[in-house]
């Protein structure tokens, strides 16, 4: 069963990403250690699509790796 978009956004927020407004039902999540942004499209109650789950997982992994490399 796919997770809800609100769960993905909670994970991003917990990892230190901040939300920026987007157009319509799009939200942009940015982090100082992550190049670019993660875009979440849809309403928070909607099921997450596989590509959205994959993008969030990869972004969080990149940020965690960047934190480990910092002195």
Image: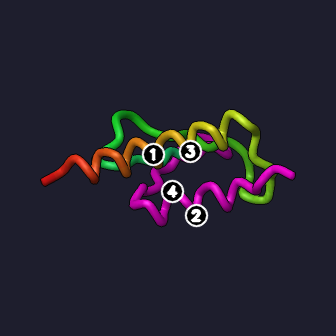
Pinpoint residue 55: horizontal percent, then vertical percent.
57, 37
- Please report the residue visible at 70 percent of the width from the left and 54 percent of the height from the top: 5
| Residue at mark 4 to residue at mark 2: CA–CA distance | 5 Å
Q: CA distance from mark 2 to mark 1?
A: 15 Å
What residue would you read off at disc 4?
A: 12
Disc on res. 56? 3
Give the residue pinned by disc 2: 10
Q: Is residue 22 magenta?
A: yes
The earlier-in-sequence mark between 1 and 3 is 3
Residues marked 3 and 4 touching at CB (< 8 Å):
yes
The mark that comes first in sequence, 3 or 4, is 4
7 on left or right of 30: right
Query: Is 9 covered by the magenta stretch?
Result: yes
The location of residue 1, given as percent across then percent down, is: 87, 52
Label 2 or label 1, whichever lies nearer to me, is: 1
Percent x, y of residue 67: 28, 53
The residue sitting at the left extreme is 71
Residue 61 shows which numbered tag?
1
Residue 18 picture location, percent across and down: 42, 57
Are discs 4 and 2 less than 8 Å apart at CB?
A: yes
User: Which of the two discs, 1 and 4, labels the residue nearer the N terminus?
Assistant: 4
Q: Is residue 1 left or right of residue 4?
A: right
Stretch of the chain drawn in magenta = 1-27
- Residue appearing at x 47%, y 49% in the figure: 60
Q: Nearer the viewer, residue 16 or 24?
A: 16
């Amino acid at each position: 069963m796919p997770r809800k978009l609100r769960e993905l956004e909670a994970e991003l927020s917990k990892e230190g990403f901040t939300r920026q407004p987007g157009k319509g039902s799009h939200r942009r999540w940015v982090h100082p250690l992550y190049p670019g942004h993660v875009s979440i499209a849809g309403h928070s109650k909607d099921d997450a699509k596989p590509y959205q789950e994959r993008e969030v997982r990869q972004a969080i992994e990149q940020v965690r790796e960047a934190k480990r490399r910092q002195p």
